[in-house]
Image: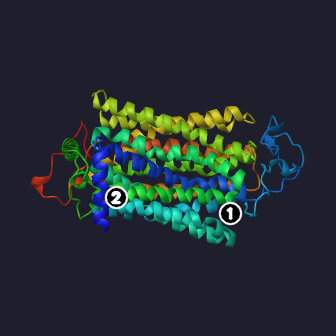
Amino acid sequence: TDSMDQTKVDKFLLQTCGWIPARFALATLAFLGFVNLFMVRVNLSVAIVAMVRPPNITDDIQAQCLQTNDEGTIHKRAKTDIEVYGALDNSSLSDGLEDDGLFAWNEMTQGVILGSYFYGYAITQILGGRLAEIYGTRWVFGGCIFGGAICTLLTPVVSKAHYAALIALRVIMGLISGVSWPSMHALLARWIPPLERSRFIASVYLATTLSVTFTLPLCGLIIAWHGWEAAFYVTGCLSLIWCIFWFSLMYDSPSVHPRISQDEREHIELSVSIGGSSRQPSKKIPWKGIATSLPVWAIIICDMGNTFGLSLYMNQLPTYMKNVLGFSIKSNGVLSGLPFLSRYIGGIIASSSGDWLVGSGLLSIINTRRIFSAIAMLGPAVVLLGVAYSGCEPGITVALLCLSLFFNGAITTSQLVNHTDIAPNFSGTLFGISNTFASIASFISPIAVGAITKDQQTIFAWQKVFWMCVPIYFLTEVFYLIFCSGTVQSWNYSGQPIHNQPPVPTNGEDSIPLQQ
């Protein structure tokens, strides 16, 4: 019965939407999937501002830059971090909410809660990539969005039980969501021709950035109007609605898609085979080749540095906006989302430029990856120094944060797509490996910030936070620039008969192993 219903749906869509390229439909579904993935991931970053009681501020603690009244407008402003106004009236920062938060969690506890998602997230990365390579992305990616939606709907009830229960729920949510990126990377190698991959990465993967852009202000408004619990109910239900469309319309490869045109199918299959992808996944993973490959480690190290900094923006920025710059919950969401809109724009520009540079022959794949990686990593490192010393100038601070993530958008044309350059047959597994290490950076980042800012939500403390990120960006990028590669590695063809192995394209470079 289910198969008959699916056939009816396919026939209807073929008649009404058959003119739409299958890759476009896939990109749209994947785009909305990542929007939902990050919607349920970052909603807690804003909600926790309303969930937690503000710290008791005494005359021993330096005054913050801004104080806001119930309408969210500024009525007092400090010019420097050294200026002390004495005890602050916490009611001025209540943001129009009925209370000042239900939970008395300090900064360290909040850091652990925000980072707990990544405890589970790190564990299932490799599993997600491998499952998708063998069984397909449809059920793996769709299942992770469905599971994340259920966990989100349970969050308000679990939070009121105990913060340890919330941590456990976020760990479970991370376990479920950990399969998302690597499973989509496996789909990328099957569906998207090599010269279109940067644009696909930008249009689909940057949905996460656009999701943060709109989720933060959306949750801010929902919380201000209906309370913090509503933020979880709304985002959870939106994810469940997406699941209906995903399971009805998505297919794992062009060869099994019932509505794809013959021309598009042949174009995709020829392009991905030339790019080094095989139709049948290898049952054997070349662990030795992967573990001893410097290009793989270059991706891993760069991914860790990038994710450490990005985690600061996603998890801690709303806290900084309120406790240091003093914005209300409504303004907080909007202003915290603006840097991610800048990142989306930067990513679109970088991906289009990268594909054009490679397609026109002006730059090789490897040089394109290096140039855009330098922009994505060194740009934020420099700009964060300006943020650290922008003082009580919220306009300048927000503008610099936007510029920082605008540069970081170039990551879509560098290490984020580099897995498919060096091993398209194992791109899902490689992405899972690199994201496993990156997840470690993701849960270390909020804990480190919590330790630095515990009981001292001041500009001086946050200067230390921003300075902490600068050498991490710089050192991890230098490693990537030295050891990255744009060549399909020889172990990409592991497990295939010799006569089925296409020649390894060199692009003027060789594979770089750790040892011969």
Looking at the image, which is closer to me, 84 or 66?
A: 66
Residue 202 appears in the rendering: yes
Looking at the image, residue 124 lies above or below residue 512: below
Q: Residues within 10 Å of mark 1 (few under 14, many from 20)?
A: some
* Distance Cα–Cα, label 1 vs label 2: 36 Å
Tally the marks: 2
**Residue 491 picture location, percent across and down:** 23, 54
Q: Position of residue 122 (x, y in %)?
A: 47, 62
Q: On screen, 332 above or below 1? A: above
Q: If you read the primary sequence from the N terminus, does the residue marked by circle 1 or circle 2 appear first?
A: 1
Q: Residues within 10 Å of mark 2 (few under 14, many from 20)?
A: many
> Tag 2's secondary structure?
helix
What residue appears at the point 77 percent right and 53 percent down from the top-left corner? 97
- Label drawn at residue 78: none
Task: Identify the element where label 1 is drawn.
Answer: helix
Q: Is residue 390 visible?
A: no
Q: Which residue is mark 1?
A: 109
Q: What numbered label is drawn on residue 137?
A: 2
Q: Amino acid at mark 2?
A: Thr
**368, 131: nearer the viewer:** 131
Q: Quadrant of residue 76?
A: top right
